[in-house]
């Protein structure tokens, strides 16, 4: 039976005991959540977990490099590794430099909806202005008049405009947390 040497004291000991295992565990989770996002199998919490664990993965990977710094220094002098890094950098640059289709038109549409008077927005979403006002007041939102925009109503009530848009579109009327605080 082969015994491993006793761990040294301090930071290097912690790196030796945890970094490689953490790199593989977090890398596996980031990979799985990345595939889920790529194939549109999930969003929301998976997206948040992927982003935060991705940041954790970067930290752990850097600690892994610190732990194996001598091996990495030798590896970086090898021509094959330099070529692999160059190919990876070029691939990344291709994504950064690729022409875009411009800004997402959905963002512009939402901005327009937020600035439109409630009386004009309501028919666009298939309801009468009175119904839009009823949905907002049912959730505890004060509507001074239907000629005001959702952005104006949101500012008046100290709430997020997106919350109001959800209410007008038919989201369940639940009081906004800012309105229930006393």
Image: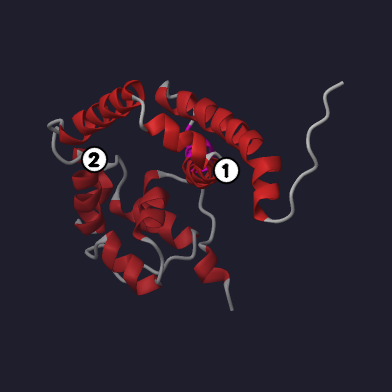
Q: Residue at x 46, y 42 (%)?
A: 51
Q: Mark 2 points at which residue?
A: 106
Please give the range of residues in magenta: 43-50
**Which quadrant of the rendered structure holds the C terminus?**
bottom right
- The front one of 172 and 34 is 34
State the image quarter where residue 76 is shown: top left
Q: How far apart are marks 1 and 2 (CA)?
A: 46 Å
Q: Where is residue 83 in the image (x, y as percent from the top left)?
A: 28, 23
Mainly helix, strand or loop, the magenta region? helix
Q: Where is residue 107 in the image (x, y as percent from the top left)?
A: 23, 45
The secondary element bearing badge 2 is classed as helix
Q: Which of marks 1 and 2 is in front?
A: 1
- Give the mark nearest the N terminus, 1 or 2: 1
Q: Where is residue 158 in the image (x, y as percent from the top left)?
A: 40, 71
Q: Residue at x 28, y 63 (%)?
A: 151
Q: Name the residue under label 1.
A: 67
């Amino acid at each position: 039976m082969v015994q491993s040497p006793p761990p040294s004291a301090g930071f290097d000991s912690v790196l030796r005991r945890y970094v490689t295992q953490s790199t593989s565990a977090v890398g596996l989770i980031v990979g799985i959540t990345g595939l889920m996002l790529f194939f549109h199998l999930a969003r929301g919490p998976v997206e948040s977990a992927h982003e935060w664990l991705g940041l954790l993965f970067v930290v752990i990977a850097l600690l892994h490099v610190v732990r194996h710094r001598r091996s990495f220094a030798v590896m970086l002098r090898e021509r094959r590794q330099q070529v692999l890094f160059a190919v990876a950098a070029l691939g990344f640059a291709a994504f950064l430099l690729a022409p875009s289709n411009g800004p997402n038109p959905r963002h512009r549409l939402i901005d327009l909806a937020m600035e439109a008077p409630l009386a004009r927005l309501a028919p666009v979403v298939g309801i009468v202005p009175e119904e839009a006002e009823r949905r907002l007041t049912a959730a505890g939102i004060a509507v001074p008049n239907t000629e005001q925009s959702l952005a104006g109503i949101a500012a008046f009530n100290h709430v997020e405009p997106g919350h109001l848009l959800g209410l007008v579109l038919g989201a369940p009327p639940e009081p906004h947390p800012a309105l229930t605080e006393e």
